Amino acid sequence: MAEGEIRIGVYVCHCGLNIAGSVDCKEVAKYAATLPHVVLAKDNRYTCSDQGQEMIKKDIKEHRLNRVVVASCSPRLHEPTFRKTCEDAGLNKYLFEMANIREQCSWVHLYDRKAATEKAKDLVKMAVAKAALLQPAEEIEVPITREALVIGGGVAGIQAALDLADTGYKVYLVEKEPSIGGMMARIDKTFPTMDCSICILAPKMSDVGHHPNIELLTNSEVVEVKGYIGNFHVKVLKKPRYVKSDCTACGECAKVCPVIAPNEFDAGLAIRHAIYTPFAQAVPSTYIIDMNRCLNKDGVIVCDKCIKACERQAIDFDMKPETIELKVGTIIVAIGADVFDPSVLPNYGYGKYSNVITSLEFERLINAGGPSGGHLIRPSDMQIPQRVAFIQCVGSRSDRNGRLYCSNVCCMNTIKDSLLIKEHWPETEIYVFYVDIRAYGKGFEDLYKRAKKEGVIFIRGLPAEIIEDRKTHNLWLIGENTLQNELYKVNVDMVILSVGLEPRKESEIIQRLLTLSKTQDGFFMEAHPKLRPVDAATGGIFFAGCAEAPKDIKDSVTQASAAAARAGILMAKGKVTVEAITPISYADKCKACGLCTKVCPYNAITLNKELKRIEVIEAACGGCGTCAAECPFDALTQNHFTDEQILAQIDAVTEYDAEKKIVAFCCNWCAYAGADFAGVSRMQYPSNVRIIRTMCSGRVAPKFIERAFAKGAAAVLVAGCHPGDCHYINANYHTKRRVERFWEKMEKNGLNKERLQLLWASAAEGERFASKIREMQTIVEKVSREEIESSKKVFEKALGGS
Amino acid sequence: MSEAQEYVPSVIKAEELNPKFKYEMSKKHGAEKIMLCFQCGTCTADCPISRFSDFYRPRKIARMMQLGLKDRLLSDEALWLCSSCFTCVDHCPQGVEIAGIVRVLRNLSVKENRIMPLVYRELASNLLKGGYVYEIVESRHKKRAELGLPPLPKPNLEEIAKIFEITGSSKMLENVKTFEKVKS
């Protein structure tokens, strides 16, 4: 820390009339000048302008300022700007603090100038109190290994791997199936261009197989991931193929294999042998033996037909599973999606009526390389159907049967499928039963129009049920044509259920291994839905394809290239800086209890049992501060959000009129952003709330709440992201636990627990935040003097040691 | 020309729409999710009444509520065709309780003295007279005794009458217009 006297400069910004319209900025600046350590306080029209910034730089030099406070907009907007200003003037950027008097003051108290001005003074006082305790900090640099791991070998994984490999990075592509290709390899044609799917994918697959920078690991699964951004240590389990890479894929072995099994690639509509290749274009083309089917078990050879048939002697029953250890700098998650299983819907009879099939089964039936050689035949009698119905939204847009979201691809897939039928058998009657047709992409509407032109009949209204004619196996569809307000009863030969997409079952394993977050729909959550759409919240990890949300081939490829570019940026730099908001531990106070290691969402803290102390891996730390809140011995705190700084802010709030005030702790990503959004939307709420920003609600230690009550605050609000949406994976669950325990404590001591409120509000839920404050205002009004006094007494102890 | 004059097109006029109606209704138990209906028609498709009626369409009732066509809804006899089998509730992909919505609308219809099938008045008078909605004949009591079932509890007619008075049900039942049969 800079030795000697603390010299703070305060700048109160008018922001034109945005702030000055409802806050008396001159008076706020005058007040700021009276605060301890403040050597100068100014107000000006636009502090963020070049002149404004130049003035700060000049003052830092002329007045030897060693702390700067700007009272203006949200730090989420201009903190980086002013931090840079300070750095330019030679002041460490962690010696800068901001008071949010626009989004959280002038804009939400437009019509009460006096109250808004008083609140602005308080906010400046809080910022000054924190600023006096700020410490300079250096950001550490972490080197990044210039190798990448791509999990999943569908079209997204293939594209990401090729892009990275072409850039010059070594890529490991891990695929759990025997061949790469994923879902796209199984589809007949792509929309809206009607290209042959495998024809455009196969060259890419073969590029992956031959690329000198790509190491392809098929039939393999990621089983362990340790480390952090730039330095991941990954273990991959490579299961044996029992066929060596000498295999030329001549297929003689499969011809003699006596065992048959359903072919997974053809959705079980065709058969394969125990030794097989999933499909003609498979990469690698090496055959594989399915040990669950093969007659030879545990090294006991009872059938050697394939061994004898193989000229190259490539078959090796002694192959063992291998664990491969990799060290990579970045990881791209491209694990794709599963298709919805409609057998849970009794009214559609899938699995019971042979002529009800899914859209994926249809793809295999219409594909020239499929089980029927491209003839669309119905399963019951192998005849070409005359009348076909498609049912949309099977497993999508429903909170009962399947998933609430729209699966994105099924409308266009059905339109494409209907055209494929028309192409081969133009006389076929085709009915599409839908709720809404979503033809939103480039060329989609054209394709939709073409289908209508070809005579495909679109009927708005889903059938309630399908009834099978037992003799003919034809199907009756009964429902309402909602556009005509009439019921329909349609007889068809075959029904295709347009099934939706859902998160992979294995996605939970990947989530756990990589400590990722998921959105409510079960897909992986991006770091920011608009501005960082392919980044995971965990550093160094990126998403591509359906792992993040259902999407079509084009979007998957686009996202894969984006993910590759994002990973490439990190690896090109070769190092990454970590924001200095990591934990500080005091070895003298630490009892090595290990509580902090248990709450850390990133496993960034380890317990050294021998030395009886904890070790922090700063590069892995996300900066939530949950560990600091958990420590019962005050042995851990968070850089830039230290206990002393936060307590100083609380004390500043509660110095005067505490019994009328609400102390609110808001997490940077959701609740604080939500409060900002309330400001941007000019939602008005009571002015007695004072917001203290923490990175995560998990930083809010019970002692902070105790301190607020001990100082006589009327009410306390702890606000964070919705459970499951936490930007620090799961840190806000600890918030919930701590608040619940605090409520119990309040009840036990005869205090009204309503005075402590917990709120989950997203960055878009400004109104939710505003109405919470309004609701709390009624609580504040009811709190009596006696109640304030008794809570002061109960939490008396919290007053010590600030 | 004369034909054209006689023809009255079924037009929804802007002034008929009450944009606040859906908010009022969504506060009532059973109709909370009305705003979520996206008109897929699953309710009508499932409805056993719709299969035998040319004009009873639960989907349409939900749409009319969203649009705020209050007068049309409350004066529509079709509202009383629902048999409350709850199939629509079971199958709605958005969790909208159509049968609940119908109940809410029926209550409102009676409360605002619109219409009600005559039979309800008869049921109410049964309740007031004998304590049961249906008249229980003497042979039924005997049969129960023969089968060893406990006797039916004796209703407290005074209390029932009181409930009718306090809740205002008696007045409502008197004032509401009745009809005998849904016109098709």
Image (tube, grey):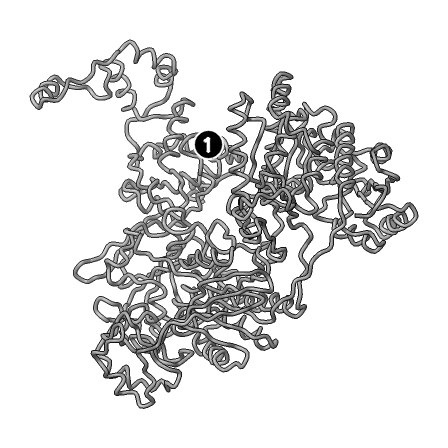
Percent x, y of residue A71: 78, 41
Q: Dot 1 falls on which chain?
A: B
In the image, taking residue A482 as reference, residue A569 lies left or right, namely: right
As drawn, the residue found furthest toward the left would be: B146
A705 lies above or below B37: above
A464 lies above or below A551: above
Q: Quadrant of residue A351?
A: bottom left
Q: Which residue is drawn at 44% across and 38% down?
A: B33
Q: Quadrant of residue A706?
A: top right
Dot 1 corresponds to which residue?
B25
As drawn, the residue found furthest toward the right would be: A62
Residue A415 visible from this viewpoint: yes
Nearer to us in this view, A422 or A300 = A300
Q: Which residue is drawn at 52% across and 24% down?
A: A747
Q: How many labels does the image show?
A: 1
Nearer to us in this view, B46 or B116 = B46
As drawn, the residue found furthest toward the bottom would be: A311
Residue A763 visible from this viewpoint: no
